[in-house]
Image: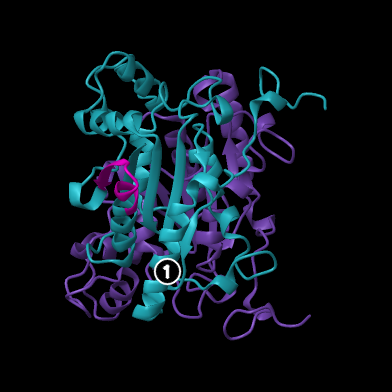
Chain colours: A purple, B cyan
Amino acid sequence: MNVLIVHAHPEPQSFTTSMKDLAAATFKESGNAVQVSDLYAMRFNPVATECDFTSRSNPDYLVYALEQRHNYDSGSLADDISAEIDKLKWADMLVLTFPVFWYSTPAIMKGWIDRVLISGLAYGGKRFYDRGGMRGKRALIAATLGGQPHMFGPATVHGELEVMLRHVLQGTLGYVGFDVLPPFFAYHVPYISEQARANYLDRFQDHLMRLDYMEPMQMPSLDAFDDVFRPLPQ
Amino acid sequence: MNVLIVHAHPEPQSFTTSMKDLAAATFKESGNAVQVSDLYAMRFNPVATECDFTSRSNPDYLVYALEQRHNYDSGSLADDISAEIDKLKWADMLVLTFPVFWYSTPAIMKGWIDRVLISGLAYGGKRFYDRGGMRGKRALIAATLGGQPHMFGPATVHGELEVMLRHVLQGTLGYVGFDVLPPFFAYHVPYISEQARANYLDRFQDHLMRLDYMEPMQMPSLDAFDDVFRPLPQ
């Protein structure tokens, strides 16, 4: 299996980096090939602009998704985007490792999503969810956060973390067709002991070893909707 | 009233830009002061790094939120962040205008959130939701998207848009204490007629004129939770 780990943390010595390193080592030890896109180390540009396209279907007015499609077809996407797309196509599994910033990824990783999950390849027209371009591949989120476990779940102060993160889990990874595996979260990370962090790494390794036996998260199926995505009668 | 509009769109002639311009004009005509942060025009840097801090409480290991707090207290934040914070403190209302990218803001605006809504001012320790640093101010999202209205809501293909966007509405704006006004969405924008777009601008202006009469969205209240944010007995 080919694994692409996309990683973002502003501190190279961070615990999140240890999780990324552990994931890479664990996948390799099981005989898989691993590539890592360490976005901070790469100084990845997260801003979607007209510079992403060396050809234009409409030079006077930028519709970003339409130019993604046009430039993917004509092989004229910016080099940094093409390099990431090559890794994405190569990968059977995508792993995102990041600290939760505002119930989302850091901006540098949001920009990887904006610029790399292109229309025409990852999705487009009527190809999304179980008809998305990434179907047959799996995706895993492994993230750290400052909050504590008792702050998340039904009837807690913040509600369910999986709902706060639905925009990534369903609206992004599920949308493009990945089988989205149950995410792994390490809580309260800036404030816990070295021992507690070591325990989290053990639990993360255990999570990684069990991926093949996990059910992907439930996502919408287009089979339940008509040609214009209205619900079909049951 | 002082209004800060934070705007992000890669196409300067976009419909989203027309919405931003309409919002600025409408607020001014009603006698309010308006500032606009047009993030693409400013070439705003969205990437949170150690360069954001000219002083460090811990020079060897970056905990981003802790350095935000330290550098805010010591007046040593990077100039581009300080300039945005001055506008945020000045504002009674924050308006975010953007095209929905992956059920979220474009990365350049996510970076404004990551870097400008700093710990120590916007939130921190036990100050969030109705104790957040932005309480007493209002916030409004005005966004465009490619999807159609019938794709959103209970029992639709994508589910409720407000749930997909909970990470911004509650997890960001509500979290720091804003009264979050009902958002305005223009659907299917790249594919609709000029007349349909004009109708959306009329409806947006109407939305803006009625803001004073709108109930903010429901957010958690810390009054229902104890000192460590466990639910209090009812």
Q: Position of residue B81 (x, y in %)?
A: 26, 32
The magenta segment: B26-38
Q: Is residue B33 magenta?
A: yes
Query: Residue A135 appears at what percent x and percent y?
Result: 54, 71
Q: Amino acid at mark 1?
A: Tyr
A62 sits left or right of B153 in the view: left
The residue where tag 1 is placed is B200
Image spot of residue B230 (x, y percent): 72, 25
Q: In the displayed structure, would residue B157 be above or below residue A166? A: below
Task: Name the quarter where the C terminus of chain A is drawn.
Answer: bottom right
Q: Is residue B93 left or right of residue B24?
A: right
Q: Nearer the viewer, residue A151 or A200?
A: A151
Query: Which residue is at 50% across, 78% downward?
Result: A127
Quadrant for residue B56, please give it: top left
Residue A208 seen in this snapshot: no
Observer-nearest of B26 and A182: B26
- Tell which of A228 and A90 is nearer to you: A228
Left or right: B144 in relation to B160: left
> What is the chain identity of the residue bearing mark 1?
B
Which residue is painted at 18% across and 63% down in the image? A51
User: On the picture, is B55 further left or further right than A151?
Assistant: left
